[in-house]
Image (cartoon, helix red, strand yellow):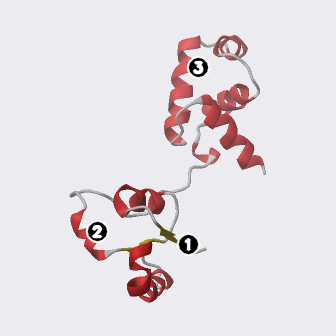
Amino acid sequence: MKILVCSMYPEDPYAIECIHEGASGYLHKTNVLHSFQDAISTIMRGEIYINPQYVQCLDYGTAIEKKEIASLNSLSKREFEICHYIVSGLSFKEIAEKLDISPKTVSAHHAHILDKLSLSNTSQLIHFVLQQKN
């Protein structure tokens, strides 16, 4: 699905974030009359559309590309197992006892899981897993 975000918010920083989250283009409302047709044509060719003047102002190395959507399939078998226990409500200590590993090892796996899935905390992890099940 192609998504063009038309917004009253300036390109900086919203355009790049929208593209990273899956949008195909970003158009500020002041440019709709001038650039809408160009934006639609660009998106329909499978390219990403952002105002060319904004692109020229970007810092070197800024990636204008969609992020790959994280998946539970990216987790190792052990990480998946620990993720399951965390989402089930077990503490790190309980998980450690169940798997015969140290709580620090569980904590390290937890950090790797959050990193792989681009999440910040356990609440986001639980929400992510519940969305994956639907």
Query: 10 or 51: nearer the eye?
Result: 10
Q: Is residue 121 above or below residue 71?
A: above
Question: Residue 110's image quarter?
Answer: top right
Q: Residue at x 22, y 69 (%)?
A: 56
Q: Which mark is residue 106?
A: 3
Instruction: Name which of mark 1 and mark 3 comes first in the sequence.
Output: 1
Question: How many numbered discs, if any?
Answer: 3
Q: Nearer the viewer, mark 2 or mark 1?
A: 2
Q: Residue at x 59, y 12 (%)?
A: 103
Neighbor class of circle 2 (other Cα within 10 Å; few <14, some 14-19, many 20+) is few
Q: Nearer the viewer, mark 3 or mark 2?
A: 2
Q: Is residue 53 above or below residue 18?
A: below
Query: 109 or 64: nearer the eye?
Result: 64
Which residue position holds label 1? 3
Which residue position holds label 2? 54
Left or right of 54, for residue 65: right
